[in-house]
Amino acid sequence: MKRRLTKLLIANRGEIALRIIRSARIFGLKTVAVYSDADANSTHVAAADESVLIGPAEASKSYLDIAAIINAARQIGADAIHPGYGFLSERPEFARAAAAANLTFVGPHPDVMAALGDKVAARRIAIQAGVPVVPGIETAELSAVRDFAARVTYPILVKAAAGGGGRGMRVVHEAAQLEASIEAASHEALAAFGDGRLFVEKYLAHPRHVEIQILGDEYGDVVALGERECSIQRRHQKIIEESPSPGISENTRAEMIDAALSLARVAHYTNAGTVEFLIEGANFYFLEVNARLQVEHPITEERFGVDLVCEQLRIASGGKIAAPPAPRGVAIECRINAEDPEHDFRPAIGTVLHLRVPAGPGVRFDSHLAPGTVISPYYDGLLGKLICFGADREEARLRMLNALNEFELLGVVNNASYLRDIIASEPFRNADLSTHFVEEHFPAWHPNDSDLTAALIAAAITAERDSIEAPPNRNGDRPASSRSPWTELRGFELWRSRP
């Protein structure tokens, strides 16, 4: 059924909120930003047509407060809500609250979201759809797990039934670790997701992580827009993605797409989603479904020439999906995060003092950053997504390498140099990929001296510029040292000065 949407509230912040605002304008919608006290001066707030304060800095009191967001939508006269990714994007209770308030939720039906968000239920749906799954059992009862491990042999993987991001997950290498691992995983899952249920699978020692982008409409049609390789991860979270996946056969690719579409049809899936698989050798296995837009969606957009947010809005408006265009070329995405890869990816905070964004043919940077942007401890540390497109993988790789060399950010410790070194590495160039790529090829990374020199020069230039631009004091003098790099660059320090 066709629905006329006029005003879209974006229940998110930062990069993805800005991304949705831009597409919503193309779709002809007015946009509403919500923001916390910490985000009052954020780029996404300035970009929206209207904005509403929803609470203090803590996410639990703002971006995770369903009542506050629904009230904001009512207050401002919105007729639709886009959840973005993260926060409430996969919470069926949020989608239900939107429906109860007569708001169109840009995403799948809440019952479908609930079923696919539960990994045990999603596994059952996959089996029903004839999709291969990793051998496993739907319980973590100690005696049952012992029997299972005896059949398939160690190692095994204990996993949370709810949530994601690697929380509530433990690899068990021997029987002596089993009881403690189950207990620890359950406690972590309960704290993270409010649900301590677990299940167990055979551990795949050296898999690749590949996902299929799907779109479904309310008329029962589903399409797939190729696959994305997501094997390069740290702490079970992706940092580099590419499309298409290098090194898999056309037969495997076709079988995975067929499996994803079969699952989507059985689940009655609507809107955008991703079916994720693990590949080991010639075999692939169902992993999970992300019932939302993915962080890495731009590489699919670049290859297929589509705007996935506009497609989401079209489906939410009651529109039909069309067969996707033929894909072309290769796209690679690097996630630039506020973190220190030299010290176990320690989260970083700070203020953006200087920013230089790469440009040129085939280069895209999705971000909310600007000089003066404050990176706080309250939210995810994603600073931006650098996406590069090429006619083939090597052209895309070289374009990404050049773009990362051009990228400059002072004031916030980040992983751009680390990503550049991965892209430049022989294992990446040869597509020697697995979910263990980081620990196998970059176990003890350190930045090189040229990174330090470049940072010092940029810091000095920034400090000098700010000193020149600063207004004179009452005596007519301009401050000489108040903006030195050593006093102002809180996010910068000598790389080897820390323990």
Image: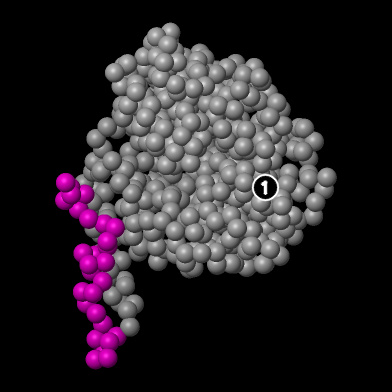
Q: Is residue 186 shown left or right of residue 440?
A: right
Q: For label 1, count other residues whose C-alpha is less than 10 Å away and answer few (under 14), some (14-19) or many (20+).
A: some
Which residue is at 27% across, 61% downward?
490
Residue hosting label 1: 96
Q: Toward the viewer: 41 or 195? A: 195
Q: Give the range drawn in magenta.
A: 472-499
Count of labels in the image: 1
Q: Quadrant of the N terminus?
A: top right
Which residue is at 33% across, 49% downward?
347
The quarter holding residue 485 reads bottom left
Which residue is at 57% across, 35% downward?
117
* Residue sitting farthest toward the right: 1
State yes or no: residue 494 in magenta: yes
Can residue 326 be seen in this snapshot? no
Which residue is at 64% across, 17% downward?
130
Can residue 323 be seen in this snapshot? yes
* Residue sitting farthest toward the top: 151
Residue type, label 1:
Arg
Question: Relative to residue 185, is residue 250 depicted above or below?
Answer: above
Q: Is residue 210 shown left or right of residue 435?
A: right
The quarter holding residue 34 reads bottom right
* Residue 97 at x, y percent in the picture: 66, 51
* Residue 148 at x, y percent in the picture: 44, 13
Secondary element under disc 1, as helix, strand or loop, is: helix
- The overriding secondary structure of the stretch rendered in magenta is loop
